[in-house]
Image (cartoon, rainbow, N blue to C red):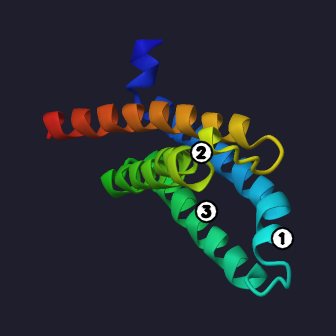
Amino acid sequence: MRNWLVSLNGAITLSGIAFLTFLGRAFMEWRYEYPSQDPAGNWDTPGALIYMALAGVWLWGLVAAGRGSRRGLIGCLIAVLLLDVAFALATYFFFCPPWTGCKGWPNVWPWNWSNLISGTIAAVALLFQLRQGKEAG
Protein backbone atom coordinates (compact mmCIF):
# COMPACT_ATOMS: atom_id res chain seq x y z
CA MET A 1 0.00 0.00 0.00
CA ARG A 2 2.82 2.41 0.84
CA ASN A 3 4.40 1.80 -2.57
CA TRP A 4 1.13 2.71 -4.29
CA LEU A 5 0.77 5.88 -2.18
CA VAL A 6 4.11 7.23 -3.35
CA SER A 7 3.67 6.11 -6.95
CA LEU A 8 2.59 8.39 -9.78
CA ASN A 9 -0.70 6.50 -10.17
CA GLY A 10 -1.40 6.82 -6.46
CA ALA A 11 -0.70 10.55 -6.43
CA ILE A 12 -2.92 11.13 -9.46
CA THR A 13 -5.72 8.98 -8.08
CA LEU A 14 -5.67 10.71 -4.70
CA SER A 15 -5.62 14.11 -6.39
CA GLY A 16 -8.62 12.99 -8.46
CA ILE A 17 -10.48 11.99 -5.30
CA ALA A 18 -9.65 15.36 -3.75
CA PHE A 19 -10.95 17.00 -6.95
CA LEU A 20 -14.25 15.13 -6.60
CA THR A 21 -14.65 16.25 -2.99
CA PHE A 22 -13.97 19.83 -4.14
CA LEU A 23 -16.74 19.49 -6.73
CA GLY A 24 -19.12 18.02 -4.16
CA ARG A 25 -18.54 20.89 -1.81
CA ALA A 26 -18.87 23.39 -4.66
CA PHE A 27 -22.27 21.97 -5.61
CA MET A 28 -23.43 22.13 -1.99
CA GLU A 29 -22.29 25.73 -1.70
CA TRP A 30 -23.92 26.60 -5.00
CA ARG A 31 -27.18 25.11 -3.79
CA TYR A 32 -27.31 26.34 -0.19
CA GLU A 33 -24.76 29.06 0.56
CA TYR A 34 -24.66 31.34 -2.48
CA PRO A 35 -28.42 31.99 -2.73
CA SER A 36 -28.41 33.33 0.84
CA GLN A 37 -25.34 35.50 0.15
CA ASP A 38 -26.62 36.86 -3.20
CA PRO A 39 -30.42 36.49 -3.43
CA ALA A 40 -30.60 38.50 -6.68
CA GLY A 41 -28.19 36.11 -8.40
CA ASN A 42 -25.83 38.81 -9.65
CA TRP A 43 -22.80 36.57 -9.17
CA ASP A 44 -24.24 33.40 -10.73
CA THR A 45 -22.41 33.67 -14.03
CA PRO A 46 -19.09 35.01 -12.69
CA GLY A 47 -19.18 32.39 -9.92
CA ALA A 48 -19.78 29.60 -12.42
CA LEU A 49 -16.92 30.86 -14.58
CA ILE A 50 -14.59 30.97 -11.59
CA TYR A 51 -15.47 27.39 -10.60
CA MET A 52 -15.07 26.24 -14.21
CA ALA A 53 -11.63 27.87 -14.40
CA LEU A 54 -10.52 26.27 -11.11
CA ALA A 55 -11.80 22.87 -12.20
CA GLY A 56 -10.15 23.28 -15.61
CA VAL A 57 -6.76 24.09 -14.10
CA TRP A 58 -7.01 21.09 -11.78
CA LEU A 59 -8.05 18.78 -14.62
CA TRP A 60 -5.18 20.09 -16.74
CA GLY A 61 -2.84 19.24 -13.87
CA LEU A 62 -4.27 15.72 -13.61
CA VAL A 63 -3.92 15.08 -17.34
CA ALA A 64 -0.43 16.59 -17.49
CA ALA A 65 0.68 14.64 -14.42
CA GLY A 66 -0.65 11.46 -16.01
CA ARG A 67 1.70 12.13 -18.92
CA GLY A 68 4.63 12.52 -16.54
CA SER A 69 4.77 16.31 -16.34
CA ARG A 70 6.34 17.80 -13.24
CA ARG A 71 4.36 21.00 -13.86
CA GLY A 72 1.16 18.96 -13.78
CA LEU A 73 2.11 17.53 -10.39
CA ILE A 74 2.87 21.02 -9.11
CA GLY A 75 -0.46 22.27 -10.47
CA CYS A 76 -2.30 19.43 -8.72
CA LEU A 77 -0.44 20.15 -5.49
CA ILE A 78 -1.31 23.85 -5.59
CA ALA A 79 -4.96 23.04 -6.34
CA VAL A 80 -5.15 20.50 -3.52
CA LEU A 81 -3.55 22.81 -1.00
CA LEU A 82 -5.61 25.88 -1.92
CA LEU A 83 -9.00 24.45 -2.86
CA ASP A 84 -9.25 21.58 -0.41
CA VAL A 85 -6.92 22.03 2.54
CA ALA A 86 -6.78 25.83 2.89
CA PHE A 87 -10.47 26.31 2.16
CA ALA A 88 -11.47 23.62 4.68
CA LEU A 89 -9.30 25.21 7.36
CA ALA A 90 -10.60 28.69 6.50
CA THR A 91 -14.17 27.44 6.81
CA TYR A 92 -13.47 25.89 10.20
CA PHE A 93 -11.55 28.84 11.66
CA PHE A 94 -12.94 31.92 9.86
CA PHE A 95 -16.03 31.45 7.66
CA CYS A 96 -18.18 29.27 9.94
CA PRO A 97 -16.47 28.41 13.23
CA PRO A 98 -18.51 25.82 15.15
CA TRP A 99 -17.90 27.53 18.50
CA THR A 100 -19.78 30.63 17.29
CA GLY A 101 -22.98 28.71 16.65
CA CYS A 102 -22.65 29.04 12.88
CA LYS A 103 -25.17 26.72 11.26
CA GLY A 104 -23.89 26.83 7.68
CA TRP A 105 -25.71 24.83 5.07
CA PRO A 106 -26.87 21.23 5.51
CA ASN A 107 -23.99 18.77 5.62
CA VAL A 108 -21.28 21.45 5.77
CA TRP A 109 -19.06 19.53 8.15
CA PRO A 110 -18.92 16.17 6.34
CA TRP A 111 -17.92 18.02 3.16
CA ASN A 112 -15.44 20.17 5.04
CA TRP A 113 -13.78 17.17 6.68
CA SER A 114 -13.77 15.18 3.42
CA ASN A 115 -11.99 18.10 1.73
CA LEU A 116 -9.46 18.38 4.52
CA ILE A 117 -8.72 14.66 4.75
CA SER A 118 -8.63 13.88 1.02
CA GLY A 119 -6.68 17.06 0.32
CA THR A 120 -4.08 16.34 2.98
CA ILE A 121 -3.57 12.74 1.84
CA ALA A 122 -3.33 13.85 -1.81
CA ALA A 123 -0.87 16.62 -0.91
CA VAL A 124 1.37 14.15 0.92
CA ALA A 125 1.30 11.73 -2.03
CA LEU A 126 2.02 14.55 -4.49
CA LEU A 127 4.90 15.83 -2.35
CA PHE A 128 6.40 12.33 -2.22
CA GLN A 129 6.07 12.05 -5.98
CA LEU A 130 7.68 15.45 -6.56
CA ARG A 131 10.49 14.62 -4.16
CA GLN A 132 11.15 11.27 -5.85
CA GLY A 133 11.33 12.98 -9.23
CA LYS A 134 13.82 15.55 -7.93
CA GLU A 135 16.05 12.91 -6.33
CA ALA A 136 16.04 10.79 -9.47
CA GLY A 137 17.01 13.74 -11.69
Q: Residue 75, percent across and down?
A: 40, 57
Tell me which label, 2 or 1, sits earlier in the chain: 1
Q: Residue 54, percent across and down?
A: 57, 66
Label 1 to label 3: alpha-carbon separation: 21 Å
Quadrant in which the C terminus is drawn:
top left
Tell me which label, 2 or 3, sits earlier in the chain: 3
Q: What residue type is labelled 3?
A: Ala
Quick one: SS at disc 2?
Answer: loop
Q: Where 111 sits versus 56, above or below?
A: above
Quick one: SS at disc 1?
Answer: helix
Q: Residues within 10 Å of mark 3 (few under 14, many from 20)?
A: some
**x 71%, y 57%: residue:** 26
Label 2 to label 3: alpha-carbon separation: 26 Å
**x 73%, y 43%: residue:** 108
Label 2 to label 1: alpha-carbon separation: 20 Å
Q: Where 25 sits versus 40, above or below?
A: above
Q: Where 36 sits versus 7, above or below?
A: below
User: Residue 55 got which mark?
Assistant: 3
- Mark 2, residue position: 97
